[in-house]
Image (cartoon, rainbow, N blue to C red):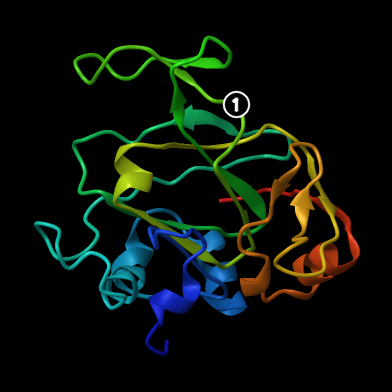
């Protein structure tokens, strides 16, 4: 695929989270969903080298992705806010296949209201998570989101357990589209490429989730 201008793909003000639509094609998506894990990563399509070519892993010990986690989410399923831990280089690429979903990023708070996050043993103490996301990104099928630096090391990420995502229409940067239930901005609304997602942020609407890998 063509070289990616990451400055143009940043969805946060510090340039630590990047969203790229259509990172894989529809044919590749169908192939990846059909095939068992993991032979596809080094054959067709060569996802590892495609991610390596973005340059975001150049500072890591291997200079490329070297660890893969495969998750499946049914409609209504999600994953609680969490951190991936210090064992990994602080950059992770998440590819969405099959369905859209919404990635929320959270910060810790010194207050008493919020969810308690208990990390893995020997990683740290339990802390309170602010329930209001600091960044919310609509992930279209076939897209990739790359999380780096402090958004990886100091923040949590998660997927809310719901079967559909309600979006309130927006018009411009002053009045951007919002995820209705949380009243937070769709941070990447100008980067969306698919017809369904684009119409939802322009006109408002409901995006029904299906099986996501």
- Picture residue at 68% right of the left edge, 56% below the top: 186
**In the image: residue 11, left or right of residue 75:** left
Vertical placement of residue 113 versus 104, above or below:
above
Residue 153, position as x, y percentages in the image: 29, 40
Q: In this view, does 155 lie above or below 109?
A: below
Which image quadrant for residue 175? bottom right
Residue 212 picture location, percent across and down: 62, 50
The percent coordinates of residue 45 (x first, y second) are 40, 75
Does 41 appear above or below 181? Answer: below
Is 42 on the left-hand or right-hand side of 146?
left
Task: Please tell me how many numbered marks the rendered image carries.
Answer: 1
- The single residue placed furthest to the bottom in the displayed view is 2
The quarter of the picture where residue 137 lies is bottom right
Q: Which residue carries the number 1 mark?
A: 131
Query: Which one is in front, 188 or 73?
Result: 188
The image quadrant of residue 104 is top right
Asked if residue 110 is positioned above or below residue 1 in the image, the reply reads above
In the image, taking residue 155 as reference, residue 78 lies left or right, namely right
- Of all residues, the one furthest to the front in this rendering is 174
For the point 41% across and 90% down, which residue is it? 2
Q: Residues within 10 Å of mark 1 (few under 14, many from 20)?
A: some
Residue 196 position within the rendered picture, expressed as x and y whole percent measured from the top left: 80, 68
């Amino acid at each position: 695929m063509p070289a990616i201008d990451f400055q143009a793909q940043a969805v946060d003000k510090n340039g630590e989270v990047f969203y790229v639509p259509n990172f894989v094609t529809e044919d590749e998506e169908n192939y990846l969903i059909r095939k068992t894990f993991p032979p596809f990563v080094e054959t067709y399509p060569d996802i590892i080298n495609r991610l390596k070519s973005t340059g975001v892993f150049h500072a890591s010990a291997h200079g490329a992705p070297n660890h893969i986690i495969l998750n499946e989410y049914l409609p209504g399923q999600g994953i609680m806010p969490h951190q991936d831990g210090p064992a990994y280089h602080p950059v992770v690429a998440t590819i969405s296949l099959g369905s859209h979903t919404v990635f929320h990023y959270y910060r810790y708070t010194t207050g008493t209201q919020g969810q308690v996050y208990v990390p893995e043993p020997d990683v740290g103490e339990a802390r309170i998570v602010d329930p209001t996301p600091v960044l919310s990104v609509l992930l279209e099928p076939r897209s990739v989101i790359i999380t780096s630096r402090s958004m990886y090391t100091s923040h949590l990420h998660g997927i809310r357990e719901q079967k559909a995502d309600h979006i309130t229409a927006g018009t411009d940067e002053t009045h951007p589209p919002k995820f209705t239930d949380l009243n937070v901005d769709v941070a990447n609304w100008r980067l969306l490429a698919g017809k369904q997602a684009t119409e939802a942020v322009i006109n408002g609407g409901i995006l029904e989730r299906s099986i996501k890998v």
